[in-house]
Image (cartoon, helix red, strand yellow):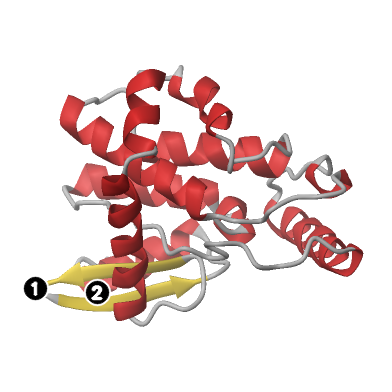
């Protein structure tokens, strides 16, 4: 969960579609930016977010709403949203769903947070998103389980072990070696060109 991740969401969708067409596995890994919260919900912090989101909207065209920033209090803890994505990924894999992907779920979480200004730390936040393809009751049981809390923490640790300290970061792994393709803003064409170069498929 990061504002630039939402900003380049269409780029990531394009990359995922390209990977699918080329037979390349595409995996979404959550990194835990602001996991646990900790940033005081002050006027200066809200002003920082407002300026950052306005800049990203101007650069990418992605929409951002202002309802969240009008709240008097908010715990900006991204761990629940990350855990929700990991939970959805497990359910989608176990159920072998083809019409609803983890990227679909992630995009819906981002939209509901960045555009609609709703609170992803509350489990009810995910009810309407689960209506797109997952059983909400089953989701809640998994989401609130110690297993999923351990699983999302493991994803955070994996990102740190890969040297990831900024988001979004896009990597490709080939023959056990990881190569960083991009950090932050990038176009779909740039990203695919870099991937093709690494994979030895440059035109």
Q: Residue at x 75, y 45 (%)?
A: 64
Image coords of residue 95 (percent x, y): 19, 25
Q: Could you tell whether 62 is left or right of 32 in the image?
A: right
10 Å crowding of disc 1: few (<14), some (14-19), many (20+): few
The reply to whether dot 2 and dot 1 touch (C-beta < 8 Å) is no
Image coords of residue 25 (percent x, y): 20, 51
Q: Residue at x 41, y 20 (%)?
A: 136
Image vertical order of residue 96 relative to residue 88, above or below: above
Q: Which of 12 and 104 lies nearest the eye of the viewer?
A: 104
Image coords of residue 129 (percent x, y): 50, 26
Nearer the viewer's eye, disc 2 or disc 1?
1
Quarter occupied by residue 191: bottom left
Residue bearing the label numbered 1: 175
Inter-mark Cα distance, 2 to 1:
11 Å
Image coords of residue 113 (percent x, y): 65, 41
Q: Could you tell whether 186 is left or right of 48 in the image?
A: left
Whichever of labels 2 and 1 marks the residue nearer the N terminus, that label is 1
10 Å crowding of disc 2: few (<14), some (14-19), many (20+): some
Secondary structure at numbered mark 2: helix
Q: Residue at x 28, y 78 (%)?
A: 179
Residue bearing the label numbered 2: 198
Q: Which of 151 and 185 lies nearest the eye of the viewer?
A: 151
């Amino acid at each position: 969960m990061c504002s630039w991740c939402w900003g380049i969401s269409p780029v990531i969708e394009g990359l995922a579609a390209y990977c699918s067409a080329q037979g390349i596995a595409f995996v979404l890994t959550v990194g835990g930016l602001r996991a646990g919260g900790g940033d005081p919900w002050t006027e200066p912090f809200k002003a920082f977010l407002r300026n950052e989101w306005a800049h990203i909207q101007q650069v990418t065209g992605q929409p951002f709403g202002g309802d969240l920033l009008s709240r008097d209090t908010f715990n900006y803890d991204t761990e629940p949203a990350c855990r929700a994505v990991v939970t959805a990924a497990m359910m989608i894999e176990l159920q072998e769903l083809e019409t609803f992907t983890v990227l679909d779920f992630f995009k819906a979480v981002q939209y509901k947070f960045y555009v609609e200004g709703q609170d992803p730390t509350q489990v009810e936040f995910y009810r309407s998103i689960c209506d797109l393809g997952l059983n909400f009751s089953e989701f809640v049981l998994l989401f609130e389980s110690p297993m999923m809390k351990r699983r999302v923490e493991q994803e955070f640790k994996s990102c740190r072990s890969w040297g990831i300290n900024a988001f979004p970061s896009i990597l490709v792994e080939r023959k056990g070696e990881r190569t960083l393709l991009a950090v932050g803003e990038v176009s779909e064409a740039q990203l695919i060109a870099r991937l093709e170069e690494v994979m030895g498929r440059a035109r």
